[in-house]
Amino acid sequence: MLEGADGRGKNLPPLTGRQYGQAVGFAAPGGDVYVFDTRKLALVKAGSTNQVIFPGF
């Protein structure tokens, strides 16, 4: 579930994504949500505690 600009959560079906400015959020088949920052080239696994997968440049 991603939080939209209005502050409410939005469900994403697996393998779909949403763009929020320079960030792209997408849902993996296992239910995990990832956020990719296209400006910094960073990848974060979002959840109750965020996990940095690739720190970017």
Image: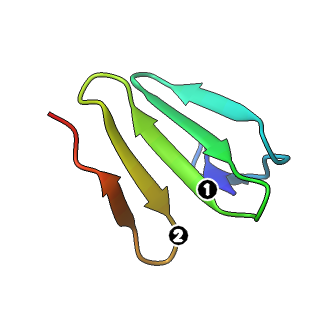
How many numbered circles are shown? 2
Could you tell me if residue 24 is visible in this image? yes
Q: Quick one: SS at disc 1?
A: strand
In the rendered structure, the answer to whether residue 15 lies left or right of residue 40 reads right
In the rendered structure, the answer to whether residue 43 lies left or right of residue 39 reads right
Mark 1, Cα crowd under 10 Å, few <14 / some 14-19 / many 20+, is: many
**Tag 1 residue:** 33
- x 44%, y 37%: residue: 36
**Tag 2 residue:** 47
The answer to which of marks 1 and 2 sits earlier in the sequence is: 1
Mark 2, Cα crowd under 10 Å, few <14 / some 14-19 / many 20+, is: few
Q: Residue furthest left?
A: 57
Colour style of the rendered protein structure = rainbow
- From the image, which quarter does the C terminus lie in? top left
The answer to the question of whether label 1 and label 2 lie on touching residues, with beta carbons closer than 8 A, is: yes
Foreground pick, 50 / 55: 55
Could you tell me if residue 5 is visible in this image? no
- x 28%, y 22%: residue: 39
> What distance separates the C-alpha of mark 1 from that of mark 2?
7 Å
Position of 47 relative to 52 (above/below)? below
Q: Quick one: SS at disc 2?
A: loop
Foreground pick, 39 / 56: 56
* Displayed quadrant of residue 50: bottom left
- x 39%, y 23%: residue: 22
Can you give x and y, in whole percent of width and height, for residue 12 in the image?
Answer: 78, 46
Q: Hey, what amino acid is under mark 2?
A: Gly
- From the image, which quarter does the N terminus lie in? bottom right
Position of 35 relative to 39 (above/below)? below
Foreground pick, 20 / 51: 51
